[in-house]
Amino acid sequence: MNGKTCSLRAIAAAGLAALTAATGFGAAALAAGYPEKPITMLVGFRAGGGVDTVGRLIAKHMEGTLGQPVVPTAKAGAGGGVLAAALAKAKPDGYTIGIAVTSTWSFNPVFAKKKRYGVNDATLLASIARAQCVIFVGSKSPYTSLKAAFAAAKGGKALSASSPAPPATFLMRHLAGKNGVKLRVINVKGTPAVIQQVLGGHVDLGWSGGHHIPYLRKGEVRVIAATDDRRLNAPSDKVPTLKEMGYDISFCGAYIMAAPKGLPADVKTKLDGALKAAINSEPVQTFIERRKLAANYQGTEGLTKEVQAEAAAWAKVRAGMKKK
């Protein structure tokens, strides 16, 4: 092969590459055949929990839509942080997606000792449903409002709370700090343990993302604040939100499906369609109803703005803590 032939082939190859880049033919061809192999769905929380359960329901429905297996794969730990870090490093080809919660991308990066990812390091595909997030007390508690609890603490009453997760712990301590009072927070594993501590009279306040509802219906607990930035479902729809009370922070959790940053547009469109159909399916909607969640489908644009705003609010909280 002479130099002239090599030169001509190099020119032809360069021309083809330029044409592919200019027309987007390569990406379009990839998307046209997508998916051609199984898709891995990383699950950021323990097996048997809400995230894992709804993730498996969604995966099963997506298989029927996309024509390829969607395989739930455990990646639990650090409040979804293990999943998010793995997703940030994954190839953005549509064959790796993941399910976690809002705080995975809003709270974790702000308070992590070593930042491994941020909200802008992922494509947030959709929110599935929101928890019913509250601060509650036992039915025999003297506190009928959050204001009353903090007023008692100002008067010298020792105030304590139980929390199942770091964001709830920071939230309640922040609220106490805003009122100039001390709050002892006991961290436990899981909201059922929080409920038992409140019912047993071991703490005054508890945070819950929905496990309190059966006890609320039985009259064993009383909700005194909605920690989301929107009103709760009945029977707690008359309870004010923290922002309505004048606080500068809110915290709740939505189940979120995400993918690596930089997905090809056509691949994302296929994932969006399959995901939305799965969220609207009867098994997933039944799960949402049984768990007393709030249906809350949002696409990438609205969800990303919401999580970015929540991350900014947490950053202000942390900055305030550093000044003290």
Image: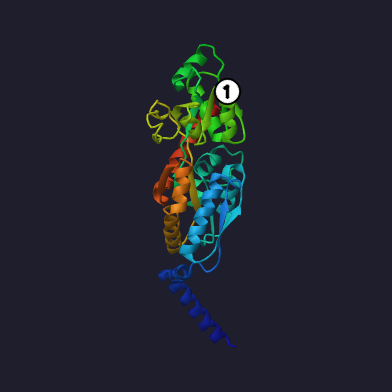
- The residue under the point 52% across, 18% down is 181
- Expressed as whole percent of the image width and height from the top left, the position of residue 171 reads 51, 30
Amino acid tagged 1: Val
Q: Is residue 302 left or right of residue 319?
A: left
Q: Which residue is mark 1?
A: 203
Q: Of all residues shown, which one is farthest toward the front?
A: 218
Q: Is residue 126 visible?
A: no
The residue furthest top is 155
* Badge 1 element: loop
Establish if 148 lies above or below 266: above
Q: Is residue 53 left or right of residue 250?
A: right
Question: How far across and how far down the image is residue 202, in percent?
Answer: 60, 22
Q: Residue 267 appears at what percent x and percent y?
A: 46, 63
Which residue is at a point 52% across and 82% down the rendered structure image? 9
The number of numbered badges drawn on the structure is 1
Which residue is located at x 49 percent, y 25 percent?
175
Q: Residues within 10 Å of mark 1 (few under 14, many from 20)?
A: many
Quadrant in which the C terminus appears: top right
